Structures are given as structure tokens and as C-alpha cells.
Amino acid sequence: MKIWLDGGLQDIESARVSVFDHGLTVGDGIFETVKAVDGRPFALTRHLDRMTTSARGLGLPDPDLDEVRRACAAVLDANPMPLGRLRITYTGGHGPLGSDRGEQGPTLVVALGGTTRRPDSTAVVTVPWTRNERGALTGLKTTSYAENVVALARAREHGASEALFANTVGQLCEGTGSNVFVVLDGEIHTPPLASGCLAGITRALAVEWTGAKETDLPLDVLERAEEIFLTSTLRDVQAVHRVDEREVTAAPGPVTAKAMRIFDERSGADLDP
């Protein structure tokens, strides 16, 4: 396996990042996960646009998107596989043992791992912790993921693949690595970005392609929604058949099944929508 680091391809066994890298010491970094099918990345332009937005929100220099594209192409070419998780990581680089940044410039790493197509439905749990819709990192895809690690571990303990958060005012927000949609009276709704959720790439495409409405939703909407589904880079559109102890009947339901079909068709027809 080869990864991109320090401007070129390196063997994964010998590639090294400094133990003083700010991404390691204080979580000062951003990342993108891109689906790659037969060596071709999906929606790469949208991911790179969001990467720039996250960098600016964190106060990092704009990433060199031409280099990032070269890196992605090189890594995909060097590691052929039918379905891959392409991970682009961009950190504050070598820095002091504190929150101040160093002067050596950012670190860029592009790596690829194999994955498999997700099941058509999954179970989720709600967790007692909240997303801060007014935080400094809200809406940015940063490497500060420890909160998600804790919540996802809770989900795994309960036989689920995802944990869902409310925000500080009790509204439904998002999952640890996904956006959430509900069907009410036959219509699809998803929390707005003002709820504090990440501007998911798959979320945006699902809203555009299905006509879903962005709606403020209380967390307890999960107790009465006719259908629930998740979206993310590697889930695409995935139905939810259980929330906590509630079984959601016949998942995927008809509205979700249609959304899944539309997403598969549209994404298959255009790899960079």
C-alpha cells in the first residue's frame, strides 16, 4: 500500500508524520472521506470545496487543491480496489506542545482503505450528549473526533452502527458521521445546517435530488417518524430499522426506497455532480 505524504507517494510501512504534528497533539486539522469506485472518486469537487471551507474556518492556509487532486489520483492508481475509502487529512503541521501553531506549514496525507457496500438498513441509538450549534468548530469537518468515538462506541454496545445527537436546544442534529432524514406524512425532512449539523456532501445531493425539506425537528420526532434514513459518503442512503428500542417497520419504507433508487441512479450517471 502507498500513501501520499510530503509531496509524493510513500510506502505505508515507512511513511512518518512528526510526533509534534498539531493534528496529533491538539487535533488541529481537517479531513475529507471520499468514496472511490474502481479507482474513481465520487463528488471530489464538492469534497474539496468543503475542505477549503473547513480550512478557512479553522484558520489554516487554503489547501493546494491541484496537489490534493494529484495526490488522490496517485493514491488511487497505486492501490487498485473495487470500493475504497479515500481519506484526505490536512493538519496544522509541526508545532509546539500547545495551542499555538508552528511555522513549518501544514501536513497533507492522502490514504486509501478498502470497504464494502453498506447493508440496506441499520440500527441507531440516541445519546445523552449534545452538539453545540454555536461552537467554534460547528459545521467544520475537523479531526477533533473524540466525541464521535465515544458516541459510536455507545452505539456499538447496543448493536447499532450509528449514534444520533440533539443540539443544545433539543433539536435533532446529526450522527457521528452521517446526516439524518425523517419521513412525516409522506414528505422527507432533514435538520437545517443551523441546527449545527455538518454540511454533508451526500446530504446536499439527497436534498437536491429528492426535494427533501430542511426543517427544525425535535429529537422526539424519531419516535413518530414513518421512516428514517441516514446519508453519508460510504452509506449513501441507508434506511433505519431501529432507533433505540423502537422498531421502524418494513425498512426501507417506500419513500426511503425511492430515495435510495434515485441516489444510486443519479450518482452512477455523474461521478462529480
Image (cartoon, grey):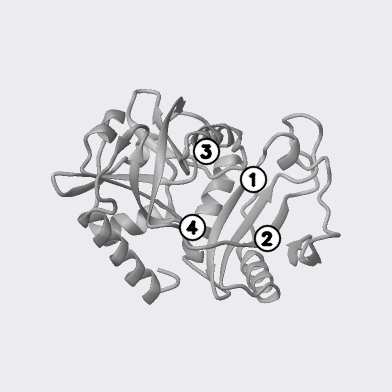
Earlier sequence position, callout 1 versus callout 2? 1
Q: Nearer the viewer, mark 4 or mark 2?
A: 4
Write down the quadrant of residue 81 in the picture.
bottom right
Location of mark 4 (residue)? 234
Q: Amino acid at mark 3?
A: Arg
Mark 1: few/some/many CA within 10 Å (<14, 14-19, 20+): many
Location of mark 1 (residue)? 60
Location of mark 2 (residue)? 110
Q: Amino acid at mark 2?
A: Val
What residue do we see at 81% from left, 31% from top? Answer: 97
Q: Please tell me how many numbered marks the rendered image carries.
A: 4
Q: At which x and y percent is residue 8?
A: 77, 67
Earlier sequence position, callout 1 versus callout 4? 1
Q: Nearer the viewer, mark 1 or mark 3?
A: 3
Check contact, mark 1 vs mark 4: CB within 8 A.
no
Q: At which x and y percent is residue 147?
A: 56, 32
Q: CA distance from mark 4 to mark 2?
A: 17 Å
What residue do we see at 49% from left, 45% from top? Answer: 177
Quadrant the C terminus occupies: bottom left
Check contact, mark 1 vs mark 3: CB within 8 A.
no
Question: Taking 202 as reference, is 24 left or right?
Answer: right
Location of mark 3 (residue)? 156
Q: Nearer the viewer, mark 1 or mark 2?
A: 2
Q: CA distance from mark 1 to mark 4?
A: 27 Å
